[in-house]
Amino acid sequence: MNQHSGAKSHLFSGGPHIMGVVNVTPDSFSDGGKYINPDKAIEHGLRLLHEGASILDVGGESTRPGAEPVDIEEEIRRVVPVIEGLRPYTDQISIDSRNAKVMEAALRAGATIINDISALSYDSRSVGVVAEAQGPVFFMHSKGNPQSMQENPFYNNVVEEVFEYLQRRISFFETNRIEVHRLVSDPGIGFGKTLEHNLLLLRNIKKFHDLGVPVMLGISRKSFIARLSEGEPAHDRIPGSIAAALWGLSQDVQFYRVHDVAETKQAFKIYQAIKGTEIKDVQV
């Protein structure tokens, strides 16, 4: 599938890059059911592109804590029409899925990027699918599964253990025809981590550059923000999300998966202007 190599060639240049979230699910923690209708999901994706998203991340299965798995055929039914509807407007579409069959259907529909919270470990076929696709892959650390991952997660040293896990996955990918230059790592904020684990990972996020691949942060509207603040519901966590993203920017993180594209892009532009760095358009 060499048609996907174009996504690779310029995806990693410049930055920061904003990945806009398009949840085609009835039970997402942030906007559950709001975009389950394909036409509404497509409209939402186009709005995110207009606001400055570099990538649209389309997902048909919620992986929030406590979420139940979705039937694979249902997941495909949710995401394929949305990808097909967005493809005329951008070639930077990622499929957020753990399932190889969904990845294949999404790639046929026009997706060019794989984003897997299981780092291609959930479905044994997914490694082969990604190797064949020749496009970028975002791979994340997650402890346990969505149903149980927040039940007393434990680490002796969360930063070292997450780093070493991602490092092992990179080595595994290399031996399975998935080249390093196609990879973006994600420490998995909120996926099998306590509040203190999340804070330790964020404080030490610069260490993850030592993996030799770009880093992505998925911090948008997550529950750790409410725990540090006043217990706000997801849609009222935008200021905290931007604060965490700006911290990431100060630590040279390259990719951000967010719900609130316009707000994040504006914050990045002001930060860069004050810092005196070259202001780059976050679109690629």
Image (tube, rainbow, N blue to C red):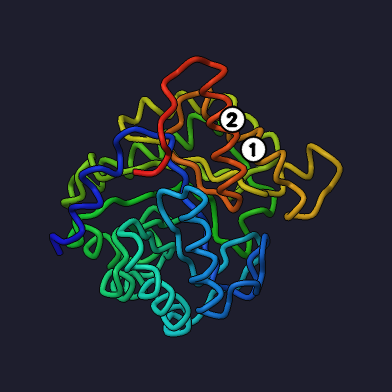
Q: Say which quadrant the C terminus sits in.
A: top left
The secondary structure type at the circle numbered 1 is helix
Reading the image, the residue beneath label 1 is 242
Name which residue lies at 19% across and 52% down: 6
Q: Position of residue 126 (x, y in %)?
A: 30, 64
Of the residues shown, which amino acid type is indicated by label 2? Leu
Q: Nearer the viewer, residue 130 or 36?
A: 36
Q: How many marks?
A: 2
Name which residue lies at 82% across and 38% down: 229
Query: Going by the image, does 81 lie left or right of 196?
Result: left
Looking at the image, the residue that sits furthest to the right is 230
In the depicted structure, whether residue 1 falls above or below residue 187: below
Q: Quadrant of residue 210?
A: top left
Q: Say which quadrant the N terminus sits in.
A: bottom left
Q: Nearer the viewer, residue 121 or 29?
A: 29
In the depicted structure, whether residue 55 falls above or below residue 45: above
Query: Going by the image, does 27 lie left or right of 251?
Result: right
Of the residues shown, which amino acid type is indicated by label 1? Ile
Asked whether the residues under the numbered discs 2 and 1 touch, taking CB atoms below 8 Å apart as contact, a structural biologist would say yes
**Which label is found at residue 246?**
2
Name which residue lies at 37% across and 49% down: 138
Q: Position of residue 29 (x, y in %)?
A: 67, 62
In the depicted structure, whether residue 137 falls above or below residue 246: below
**Which label is found at residue 128?**
none
